[in-house]
Amino acid sequence: MPDVNELLRPSLGSEASPATSIYSTTVGYIAAFFGGPIGGTAIALTNSWRLKRLGKDWPLGVIAVALTGGMAWWEQRAGGINWLNAHFGSGGQRFAVRVVGLAMFAVIYLIHRRYYRSMDMMGIKPPSGWVPGIAATIGGMAVMTALGDVLAP
């Protein structure tokens, strides 16, 4: 039978630390929507760092860079912009970035769902996400713009 202290141990953060709060799903969602996969993953990796599980979650960064680079290559070198504009109008490129960013956010949410639910159950308030959210969004947009410029024919 488990010890009473073991049952009362917080489930967030490392075993030796008190419960850790992470940035809310809203911050991740908005960063992914406007900043693409890079923006959403920046918030996810910040949360992973706060949870002391960056060693497990670092592949998210590699996936985000690969998705962003692949999208930029497809748009600039393989005729993706023409295809997007033909099917979705002049905002097709923004639409594609947002869809891929939100898909990345969905994967991130599934990975961190346990922590979000534990925070909610324990009544832990997430920290203010304005600064990291804005930084992640601007960073994601900058990376996408730079890749588009580098890969432009």
Image: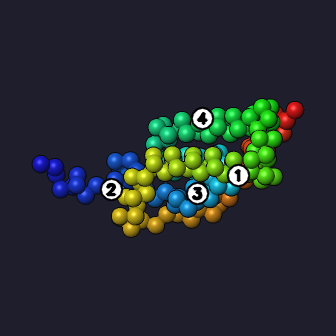
User: Which comes sooner in the sequence, label 2 or label 1?
Assistant: 2
Q: Which quadrant of the structure image shows residue 130?
A: bottom right
Q: What is the three-letter code of the residue carrying label 4?
A: Val
Other residues around mark 4 within 10 Å, as few (<14) / some (14–19) / many (≥20): few
Q: Measure the C-alpha gap from mark 4 to mark 3.
A: 19 Å
* Mark 4 vs mark 3: in front: 3
* Residue bearing mark 4: 62
Could you tell me if residue 147 is visible in this image?
A: no
* Mark 2 vs mark 1: in front: 1
Other residues around mark 2 within 10 Å, as few (<14) / some (14–19) / many (≥20): some
* Residue bearing mark 2: 10
User: Which comes sooner in the sequence, label 2 or label 3?
Assistant: 2
Assess whether mark 3 and mark 4 are in contact (beta carbons under 8 angstroms): no
* Residue bearing mark 3: 29
Other residues around mark 3 within 10 Å, as few (<14) / some (14–19) / many (≥20): many
Q: What is the three-letter code of the residue carrying label 3?
A: Tyr
Q: Which mark is residue 95?
A: 1
Q: Measure the C-alpha gap from mark 2 to mark 4.
A: 30 Å
